[in-house]
Image (cartoon, coloured by chain):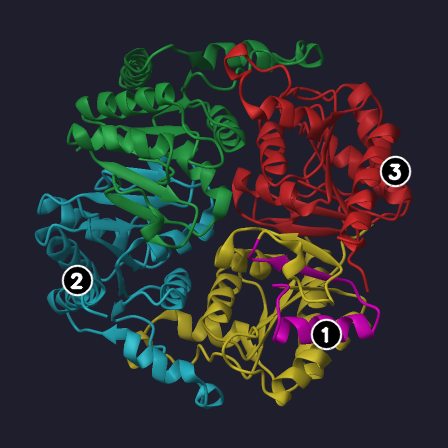
Chain colours: A red, B yellow, C cyan, D green
Amino acid sequence: MPKKICISVIGSGSGDDALSPQIAKIANEVGREIASRGAVLICGGLGGVMAEAAKGAKEKGGLTIGILPGEDPGSANPFIDITLPTGLGFARNILVAYSGDAIIAISGRLGTLSEISYALLKKKPVIGIHTWNLEQLSGRMSSFKERAYNRDILIRCENAKDAVDRAFAIIENKEKCQNGSN
Amino acid sequence: MPKKICISVIGSGSGDDALSPQIAKIANEVGREIASRGAVLICGGLGGVMAEAAKGAKEKGGLTIGILPGEDPGSANPFIDITLPTGLGFARNILVAYSGDAIIAISGRLGTLSEISYALLKKKPVIGIHTWNLEQLSGRMSSFKERAYNRDILIRCENAKDAVDRAFAIIENKEKCQNGSN
Amino acid sequence: MPKKICISVIGSGSGDDALSPQIAKIANEVGREIASRGAVLICGGLGGVMAEAAKGAKEKGGLTIGILPGEDPGSANPFIDITLPTGLGFARNILVAYSGDAIIAISGRLGTLSEISYALLKKKPVIGIHTWNLEQLSGRMSSFKERAYNRDILIRCENAKDAVDRAFAIIENKEKCQNGSN
Amino acid sequence: MPKKICISVIGSGSGDDALSPQIAKIANEVGREIASRGAVLICGGLGGVMAEAAKGAKEKGGLTIGILPGEDPGSANPFIDITLPTGLGFARNILVAYSGDAIIAISGRLGTLSEISYALLKKKPVIGIHTWNLEQLSGRMSSFKERAYNRDILIRCENAKDAVDRAFAIIENKEKCQNGSN
């Protein structure tokens, strides 16, 4: 009775900036690709990238979970099947980062950066599309191990299918290793 | 596309006390009754009442979510489909209490008491089986509105089927009211 | 360079019920007694018992910390020196419970009950004045170890001075044991 | 009775990398400068930059608060006056970020990046010394408002005195504005 594979999708909410049609399309495709592979989509439950990805997952009959910052389940976007109203505000970001077997980051701003930080801290695979580039840090940090570390782990992809393929390849490889001879 | 009904089951873990066979049986039946009605079972993901209830839900083909105190998804009991490893310790109790449309408390100790407190604070229906009795407070508190309040909300049942029936009756009645005349 | 002794004061906020003059007076005295002994007063930072206790502490030149549920430091009562705006909502209750070397509970409702639960779970000494009585649980729970356990730990006092005396006696005795021969 | 000014100091812990003597010296000086100005130093309570900064503050008779990830107050470094053992793990990072009137980031890795993200999200002034450079994001992000935004807010300084001077200048200016014409 193996546990279900969960993919967290993080990125821009529906805040002050309108979501560009390009980013919305990518988010929708990421959601569809996740559901097509039978995985659960986890997100922050609100608008923007979260709603587009959840919409995509529902179009393919997937299951969606929204880990909400507020206490009101009614604040979830209409494509969320299971709402977890945390009341923790932005501290719920860590839960989104920890809950995925892999994390796909699409665009996004400071909240997304906090989630990427937490996911990498927990050594989760993070696949980024048009998002923060941790490689290009200042020269001051260049001697730190993080640069090399992050280059390996924060994988950059250009489109939805590549990103989800990459996430599943890492998860399956990890499972293979864990079930293997060591 | 209505969101799924979620029932949180709270109660004794597998700590220092062995779970009595009576309590284990009730927890298993509660899980089966929840799954039979097509609802999602949410719990704290560990042993004791949580594992028995999740086992019951899986026996009936239900979906189970474990909101874990630790950061390791591997700490979940084997009957959890979706693990949310929070790393929040006992602070994750509030998430279990907030995530259910109703809460069923079976036996339990201080952690369960914190969850009952939070659930009642959010005006969630709480159905208790062999658990804390908030009615029997000290005389000092008897003049407080809580007594009357809690008597209405913390409903005591003797068996699993009654408890789950009661939970669903409240949830359905609430939905009827919300879809009603306003 | 020993760390400062901290006492958490928990109890009714300024919600729907007016704080009775009797409870307000006790809270004020508790704050004064804590500050008179050179300890730091920690509370939830809002009104009611929290504000009265912090006011008392400031009248005696004490230091006060408010662990706020919201993100706005401006929501603290005017007697708080150091505000910790958590944004965690009621989940901040666990922080108030964990931060005190002892906890003094004055009256209070469901939020206070969650804090008492957490404090006892962490085996903190809890001194209660006109608050929840965990001894009087239902007969169903009577076979549980909690009853005996809580009777020892949730100490009931009738007035402010006794409560603070008791808290300090326990803290000092504990320090003596830890520095002792065992 | 104005509330005390609090400065949060964030940065590398004592993890796998040894703290460089240069970074340790800067952290110590930042602590001394904060205490010299009568402000409270808040940090994560552990080793590395946190311990060096707290040590500096104590050398100047300042007050130090450690917001610990664990539940054990004993895990604090010896220069912490007031321990807040949260049990929240890395989720405590948001509390460190929210609690300062300004945040000074010294070196640091992924945990520090999460704190910088949260501090900027709350529009707190963040002064960075040899730390993450949010300006140098990838070309993909260059069209986002964040770039301009962060350039204004994440201020880079080369030494401890400049950093603390800058933090106080911003805090005092903000207070002046708030007490101004409205």
On whether residue B55 falls in the magenta region, the answer is: yes
Q: How crowded is mark 2: few (under 14 residues within 10 Å), some or many (20 or more)?
A: many
Left or right: residue D122 versus residue A46 is left
Q: Do the residues at pointers 1 and 2 share their chain?
A: no
Q: Which mark is residue C26?
A: 2
Q: What is the x, y in percent for residue A174?
A: 77, 45
The residue carrying mark 3 is A32
As drawn, the residue found furthest toward the front would be A182
Left or right: residue D159 versus residue A6 is left
Is A33 rendered above or below residue A149? below
Q: Do the residues at pointers 2 and 3 share their chain?
A: no
The residue carrying mark 1 is B31
Q: Residues within 10 Å of mark 3 (few under 14, many from 20)?
A: many
Residue C136 seen: no
Is A154 rendered above or below residue C70? above
Subunit that carries the residue with mark 2: C
Say which amino acid is labelled 2. Ile
Say which quarter of the image contains residue C160: bottom left
Subunit that carries the residue with mark 1: B
